[in-house]
Amino acid sequence: MKFSSKALGVAIATFATAALAQTPAPTPAAAPVAQPAQFAVCAACHEVTPGAVSLGPNLAGVVGRKAGSTDYDYSPAMKASGITWTPDKLRAFIANPVGVVPGNKMDFDGASDDDAKAIVDYLASLKG
Ligand code: HEC
């Protein structure tokens, strides 16, 4: 048998493309809920990669956590709030930060109830 090297190259390229197309995309095991568009405003001040700190405290694992309990330099109001971030508490805080924790230093006016729900569903899926 006689192949031109060009034909062989095309055959290999075709095979390689087919093989690549069959490789399943890697799925991150710990992130079953995709980050919603509504979280973009939070991401300006908050990291969700464990360990990373931005202008505000890290939010990975915030659901179930005591308010003001990471290494972050919280306001006295947040530290003294006595809140544990259940999904309900978190939704209420995101919709009305000053109403839920008066005197806190998060410079955010509040999201709509629908946006708060989408954000909390997402945060609840993150591990700390
Ligand atoms: C302008 C910056 C900024 C934006 C925007 C912002 N935050 Fe914050 N956030 C902060 C700061 C600063 C604190 C610390 C507040 C304190 O100590 O009083 C905070 C605190 C929090 C806490 C308490 C965390 C803990 O460890 O107790 C949660 C929860 C939170 N933010 C969620 C959100 C969510 C969700 C959004 C988007 C809807 C958001 N934040 C938008 C700056 C921001």
Image (cartoon, rainbow, N blue to C red):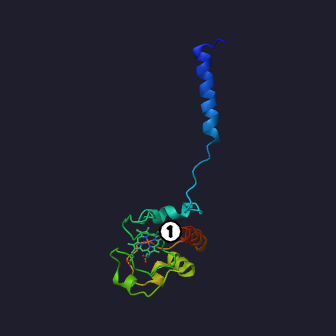
Instruction: Classify the position of the N terminus by image quarter.
Output: top right
Q: Ligand 1 is located in which of the four quadrants?
A: bottom left
Q: Position of residue 17 (x, y in %)?
A: 61, 33
The residue at the point 52 percent across, 67 percent down is 126
Residue 77 higher or lower than 50, as above or below: below
Q: Nearer the viewer, residue 30 or 39?
A: 30
Dot 1: few (<14), some (14–19), or many (≥20) neighbours within 10 Å? some
What amino acid is found at the position of numbered circle 1 in the picture? Lys
Q: Nearer the viewer, residue 29 or 89?
A: 29
Q: Nearer the viewer, residue 34 or 100?
A: 34
> Residue pushed farthest right?
1
Residue 87 higher or lower than 41, as above or below: below
The residue at the point 60 percent across, 62 percent down is 32
Q: Nearer the viewer, residue 40 or 122?
A: 122
Q: Position of residue 33 (x, y in %)?
A: 59, 63
Tell me: is circle 1 under 8 Å from ligand 1: no
Residue 70 lies in quadrant: bottom left
> Residue pushed farthest front?
1
Circle 1 — which element? Answer: loop
Q: Position of residue 96 (x, y in %)?
A: 50, 78
Marks counted in the figure total 1
Left or right: 110 as drawn, with respect to 6: left
Q: Position of residue 122 (x, y in %)?
A: 56, 67
Left or right: 51 as drawn, with respect to 29: left
Check disc 1 and report the residue beneath it.
127
